[in-house]
Amino acid sequence: MSPSAADTPTLFALHGLGLSRRLFEPLIRELEDAFDVVAIDLPGFGDERDSPETSVEQMTALVIRRIRERSPQRWLIAGHSMGGKIASLVAERTMSGRSGLFGLAGVVLLAGSPLSPEPMDEERRRTMLGWVDDGPLDEEQARTFLDQNVGAPLPAALERQTLDDLLRTSPRAWREWLETGSRVDCSGGASAVPALLVAGGADEDLGEDAQRRTNGRTYPRSRLVTLEGAGHLLPLERSVEVAAAIREFWAEEAGTAPFVPADAARAIASARTSSRVRAVLADRALADDPHYAPQALTAAQLTTLRAIAAQVVPQDGPAIDLAARVDAQLAEGRGDGWRSAELPADPVAYGLALDALAGFESAADQDAALRDLGSRSLGSLSAEQLSAWFEDCRVDLVRQWLAHPASLARVGYDGYATGGDTALIPGFRLLGADEREPWEPSTGSHR
């Protein structure tokens, strides 16, 4: 399930107010060996300056269309300032299954505007709105905006490029964001998506404190990096540091999940798969939290369960943290609806059994130790109880492995793609042995 060189992850990048996709050119150069960076002009800016679709909703729809056109397998979405709000909306709709996208691995917000109303000095807002009363920004206004948003002067070429982007910004788009887009509250529940938040130490409105209060709440699984002395235009001011943070985020967290092959990812994203099922699979496909804190078990019990999981379901390549997923299942009270009458409730049974097996992770012959379970009592559990618990434990671990979309692809299962959101369920047409529908993923690519 390991990706090939052709399976480079994609980083979609959305610029901030008054800028364009050119904002990310320095970052593209820094990341070209690790990511396919696709920077997008938002409506009203850059080459899209004449587009009238400048509302937050319309911008979000355009980005979803652009991503769908590329059909990426594994991707991050990055947003700078205004683009941060759009990036978070795209992420929310992807994880809900509604966007028809699949493969989102994480969110990167660079001085990102939050889903809640953006913190902004109201006097500055009024001044900026006044700049477009009679048309586009002029040179003096553009330079004032630039000076207010950097921690130190930019190199001359980047400064000129930024000024030119400001000068060609649509007054309608500028006003739409300041009057409505930045104020609209799109916040909802917390997101399970891993996130990287980068803040400038000299950014007055969207610096470290603002990121903690806003985007930090939206993304509990976020890491916050503050670049001291940097202002608001982070991709231009600190492209090297931003690129390093993105690489680290991918290597240590967002990119550590098992790989879902391209044809399986396309089937999940397709109209054959319902939004509800797509949302479930999108959540399962996220990389596990490397800092996961157990909810039903103790830290020691989770360590023991991880060692047992490695024996019961050995995994090659990027691994699923099966023990953490079973712990979450126990904490939420989810299961298969059955347990042995000899055992107490699942969380209690797990705790007793794992306490009895304390130190298993250091055992010289773990396989033999597991095979011996049920031959004698351990701790407060009888031999019969241990045998019954271990049967449940194996089922739970295997269920968690098989539930992952990469595992479904590996075993050639695609039954999730027979529903869709329409009243007419397409189902299968070809029912003979070894016959495959044209839309079905090829099992040969997963072996």
Image: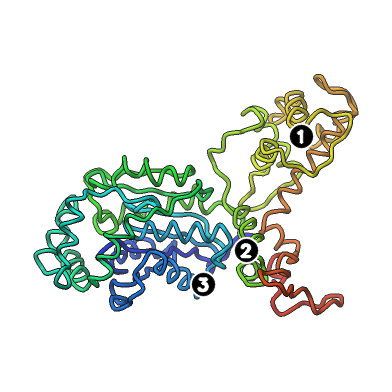
Q: Label 1, label 3: how many angstroms apart (C-alpha)?
A: 46 Å
Q: How crowded is mark 2: few (under 14 residues within 10 Å), some or many (20 or more)?
A: many
Q: Is the Cβ of the residue at disc 1 closer than 8 Å to that at disc 3? A: no
Residue 143 or 320: which is nearer the viewer?
143
Residue type at mark 2 is Ser
- Relative horizontal placement of residue 258, taking residue 11 as reference (left or right): right
- The residue located at (72%, 60%) in the rendering is 408
- The residue located at (77%, 77%) in the rendering is 436
Tag shown at residue 68: 3
Q: Can residue 246 be seen in this view?
A: no
> Quadrant location of the N terminus?
bottom right
Label 1 vs label 2, nearer the camera = 2
- Relative horizontal placement of residue 379, taking residue 155 as reference (left or right): right
- Relative horizontal placement of residue 85, taking residue 409 as reference (left or right): left
Tag shown at residue 275: 2
Residue 115 in percent (x, y) is at: 40, 52
Residue type at mark 3 is Arg
- The residue located at (39%, 65%) in the rendering is 32
Q: Can residue 399 be seen in this view?
A: yes
Residue 102 or 121: which is nearer the viewer?
121
The quadrant where residue 166 appears: bottom left
At mark 1, the secondary structure is helix
Residue type at mark 1 is Gln
At mark 3, the secondary structure is helix
First reached walking from the N terminus: tag 2 or tag 3: 3
Q: How crowded is mark 3: few (under 14 residues within 10 Å), some or many (20 or more)?
A: some
Residue annotated with mark 1: 366
Question: Residue most toward the top?
Answer: 380
